[in-house]
Amino acid sequence: MAPKATCNQPRVHVLGLGSIGTFAAHCLAGIPAPLTPSITLLLHRPNLVNEYIRRGRKILLETVEGEVVDCGNYHVEVLDNGEWHRVQTESGLSSAVQDDIIDHLIVSVKGAQTAAALKPLKHRLNASSHILFLQNGSGMVEAANEEVFTDPATRPNYLTGVISHGVTLNAPFDITHTGFSATSLGPIPRSKSDSEATAPSYLLEALPLVPRFNATTYSTLDILQIQLEKLAVNAFCNPLCALSDAKNKFLFTIPDTRRALLIEISRVIQALPELRGIPGISERFSVDKLETTVNGIIRANSETTCSMVVDLRRGQKTEILFINGYWCRRGREVGVPTPINDSLVRRILERQGDMELSKGY
């Protein structure tokens, strides 16, 4: 039987079912009553519906300890010819979704795909909706504002998430939790004049109740700092593993590169205007502290294969412009040279065939 949502039950939609999105969808099913949501998987390709049915209409997760935990009871919508269709997974029949407003949306598509993935949903999101951007990198919110939600008055409420768990996508709807860590969540102000978001969010309340997700909700300023730490980690892990086609443990063999890159990133962070005058910034983002943070995450996820490694293997576009590209952009803004980040962006862009784009670095 298809799951039925009660009228007062929170409704959450998940867009982007790579490793992070699939992990989030699995964890959503673990939210205890009375906050248990109705969950809809938003699929971008019709063939994914067949894959979901073939896998028993479940998401499989292999835990760090090797136990397989499955979760079912999901609703499914699929994008076909620019329109969303609700699918009855028992019969395979589908019907067009009209203008159902989406209350809570978790976005886990790749950074470069964010605006394009949101456009077919724009008419179903309004100023009462909440979008949690649970992705690698930074710059996706700006892209959404510039290309999709151009009117601040009708723009949804934004949340951001930083996920440090190691998760590998084995196949659609099948993941392995390779490294247990933490998830950090926080609000993004509706405008630069707001210091904090005002609308309370169901997701910020409910997701921390799932032990496997291990989420904590932070203030806007704190989540920004956590995001910068994660971006520093990703700027080291992703491109260097991708260029060497290696698991994370390879990174322990290049300490000099790690140090040089983190010196560069530390200088950019210390010059950012949004962190000016904040106590403890120089200590938190010192090179030594960043090295400790990076090493801790690599150690916990040494057997994980970075998403950028997988992207290059598959001949797909990477998220390099939203990771190292972020440090290049911010460095230029604050007058800090970023030659190592520039080189990594250029080399990855060349590998993925973007020769013209690479000339900008």
Image (cartoon, rainbow, N blue to C red):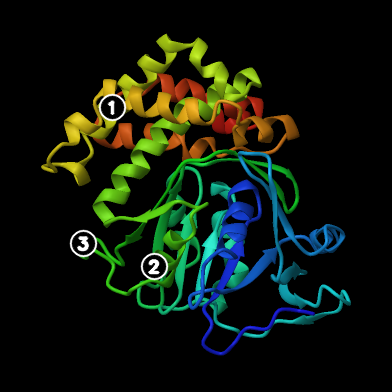
Query: Label 2 is placed on what type of residue?
Result: Glu
Marks 2 and 1, the one that precedes in the sequence: 2
Q: Is residue 242 left or right of residue 341?
A: right
Residue 266 got which mark? 1
For disc 2, the marked residue is 205
Marks 3 and 1, the one that precedes in the sequence: 3
* Quadrant (top left/top right/bottom left/bottom right) for the N terminus: bottom right
What's the CA distance linking mark 3 and mark 1? 24 Å
Query: Could you tell me if residue 329 is visible in this image?
Result: no
| 246, above or below 214, in the image | above
In this rendering, the label closer to the viewer, 3 or 2: 2
Query: Could you tell me if residue 261 is visible in this image?
Result: yes
Point out residue 344 in the picture as x, y percentages from the top left corner: 50, 23
User: At 39% from the left edge and 64% from the top edge, which residue is drawn?
Assistant: 204
Q: Is residue 79 left or right of residue 125?
A: right
User: At 47% from the left edge and 52% from the top edge, which residue is drawn?
Assistant: 140
Q: Residues within 10 Å of mark 2 (few under 14, many from 20)?
A: some
Query: Label 1 is placed on what type of residue?
Result: Ser
Q: Secondary structure at mark 2?
A: helix
